[in-house]
Image: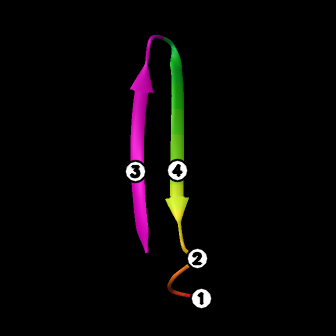
Amino acid sequence: MNCIMKSELFLINLICNDELNS
């Protein structure tokens, strides 16, 4: 499971990739 936390300006984006590890 790969989770990436990206913060831009006043927006917080949380992207979690769990396609390969189902």
Q: Which mark is residue 4?
A: 3
Q: Residues within 10 Å of mark 3 (few under 14, many from 20)?
A: few
Amino acid, disc 2: Glu
Q: Could you tell me if the residues under marks 4 and 1 are in contact, i.e. CB atoms within 8 Å? A: no
Q: Earlier in the sequence, mark 3 or mark 2?
A: 3
Residue at (53%, 35%) from the top-left corner? 13
Residue at (43%, 19%) from the top-left corner? 8
Q: Residues under labels 3 and 2: Cα distance?
A: 14 Å
- Quadrant location, the N terminus: bottom left
Q: Earlier in the sequence, mark 4 or mark 3?
A: 3
Q: Residues under labels 4 and 1: Cα distance?
A: 16 Å
Q: Which residues are magenta?
A: 1-9
Residue at (41%, 35%) from the top-left corner? 6
Q: Which mark is residue 22?
A: 1
Relative to 1, residue 21 above or below:
below
- Viewer-proximal residue among 19 and 3: 19
* Residue 10 image point, x, y percent: 51, 13
Q: Which mark is residue 15?
A: 4
Q: Secondary structure at mark 4?
A: strand
Amino acid, disc 3: Ile
8 horizontally vs 19: left or right? left
